[in-house]
Amino acid sequence: MSASIAPMGASPQAAPPNALVLDALIIGAGFSGLYQLHALRDRLGLAAQVLEAGDGVGGTWYWNRYPGARCDSESHSYAYYFSDDLLQEWTWSERYPGQAEILRYLNFVADRLDLKRDIRLGRRVTEARYDAAANLWRVRTANGEAYAATFLITAVGCLSSANIPDIPGLQDFAGRWYHTGQWPHEGVDFTGKRVGMIGTGSTGIQAAPVIAAAAAHLTVFQRTANYSIPARNAPLTDDFKQWARDNTAELRRIMHLTPNGHPFTIADRSAHDVSAEERQAIYQAAWDKGGLQFRAAFRDLLQDKAANDTASDFLRAKIREIVKDPETAAKLANIDHGFATKRPPIDTGYFETFNRDNVALVDVRATPIERITKAGIQTRDGQEYPLDIIVFATGFDAMTGSLLKLNIHGRDGLALREAWQAGPRTYLGLQVPGFPNLFTITGPGSPSVLCNMPVPIEQHVEWIAECIRHLRANGLTRIEAQPDAAERWVAHVNAAANATLLPQAGHSWYLGANVPGKPRVFMPYAGGMARYREVCAGIVERGYEGFKLTG
């Protein structure tokens, strides 16, 4: 199944004994990488391995162990649906699973499918180069190992490259600092500590209540005020667990038909179809139920600003109702974008946290952070906030950052960073022109982060596996997206985004706006997962239209 290969640039005959040549090499051992290994190794019989930088499987859920880390998809949908056996054998405990439970689930899957024997842990990829003469991807890791494979598949996740802001003076800080995406596995003890948390996106909204409950004092530094819906998280009842096991086929059908891959449908009504009183009652019922279903109350919340305003106004009023201090409430409700035009967080007691005596809010739009000092954080008005710990809940270099860090070079030495200098250009989010046999699971230009992630992951993995099966069955060895097809797809991605309100949220990581110097390009496909699935199937039916297949 495998043989030795040469170091990059050398002949195969001169291969060192510890280097492997494979049919397929997968980078990343999260949801995507585990299923891709299973699909290629166990279904197609390929020689395939996974390289994983961490010391365990789990991907996002291996690294993100910050306080309060929890999924915002309901547990019965946040799972692999390719296997009824897995669905029947695993039981979730809560409506919204926490990090530890999700990590246990992914280890359960890896063990159940015997995947770990082909996963190489502690292997951080530092370079991947396409060797056109040999039609191989040659890959190196930080510990000096060399691999080669006909097919290279990135399963590095959309939110895994930590974004640490370049604030002057961080190196001078006498306390300790952490990024939520690189959290110490032994945890952090906040007892008796003065903590400053920078960031109020989904992560900060989850972390703040947990940190505040343990710390002597928490200061939240807010640049962008945010909406949030209560999660109403609770243990699952035995009746619900049995219902989920009995209805896996129907749940799978619904998730495949809905735009966001969630197990609920969007109401077929406009926010303008009902009276103001009825609309208020609908929003209140959705608020009481909690979770992301709130945005499914009306079909036009992301297409029509006036409709969106009704939801946004309702949520701002809720913030003012919950937060007792009027000045703090005004800062938290001073939201500059429409509801769900950025990732809509769900929470457990976030706004209530600001009613605690040991919590303060700093509006860094009004008084920006000037620098980090030895003792804490100093804002432009000259005030210094003494701190023992700083938590950066500042998110990620989303969708492209993890790919660019792999130092990928395609045909004729073309660097992916150079190819994407003006923003990511892909075909379907699956392939990049100039990079033959490279597949990017949930890459930019695919629905990815706009969905319940296991749904697009499964679709991508299965599409890639079927593509490789087709190539092998027809004596073909190479597939590459064509530049004109990629340009048409990028134009379609932009058109799909512009048909919604999503691009109007200026400082959004969907646009890369959270990373200084990153091109402003709307990256995920907003046309809906169901539509995307149809597009991908149609391309296959038309003989892999837009791809060049060669022997």
Image: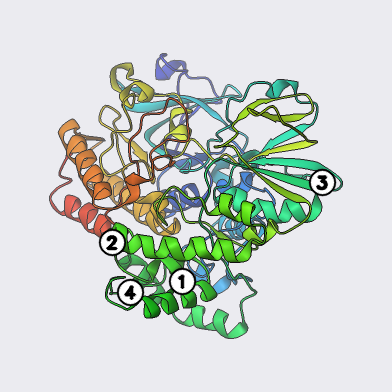
Is label 1 in a helix, a strand or a loop? Answer: helix
Q: Are marks 3 and 4 in contact (CB under 8 Å)?
A: no
Q: What is the quadrant of the N terminus in the image?
A: top left
- Give the mark nearer the N terminus: 2 vs 4: 4
Q: Which label's residue is closer to the chain start, 4 or 1?
A: 1
Residue at the location (63% across, 58% down)? 350
Residue 10, percent across and down? 42, 13
Which callout, 3 or 1, points at the residue further toward the start of the chain? 1
Give the number of the mark in front: 3 or 4: 4
Q: How is the image coloured?
A: rainbow
- Tell me the crowding category of disc 1: few under 14, some 14 to 19, or many 20 or more residues within 10 angstroms, Cα based: few
Badge number at residue 189: 3
Tell me residue 93's x, y (percent).
64, 71
Q: Identify the residue position indicated by label 1 in the image.
A: 84
Give the residue number, with chain letter if any, for mark 4. Answer: 267
Question: Under tag 3, what secondary structure?
Answer: loop
Q: 480 left or right of 7?
A: left
Whole-Å distance between the Cαs marked 2 and 4? 16 Å
Q: Is residue 182 left or right of residue 424?
A: right
Residue 69 visible in the current orientation: no
Q: Amino acid at mark 2?
A: Ala
Would you say the residues marked 3 and 1 are in contact, meaning their CB atoms lie under 8 Å apart? no
Nearest to viewer (mark 3 / mark 1): 3
**Residue found 45% across the figure and 52% down from its top:** 343
| Image quadrant in which you'd find residue 428 | top left
4 or 1: mark nearer the eye:
4
Q: Type of residue at label 3?
A: Asp
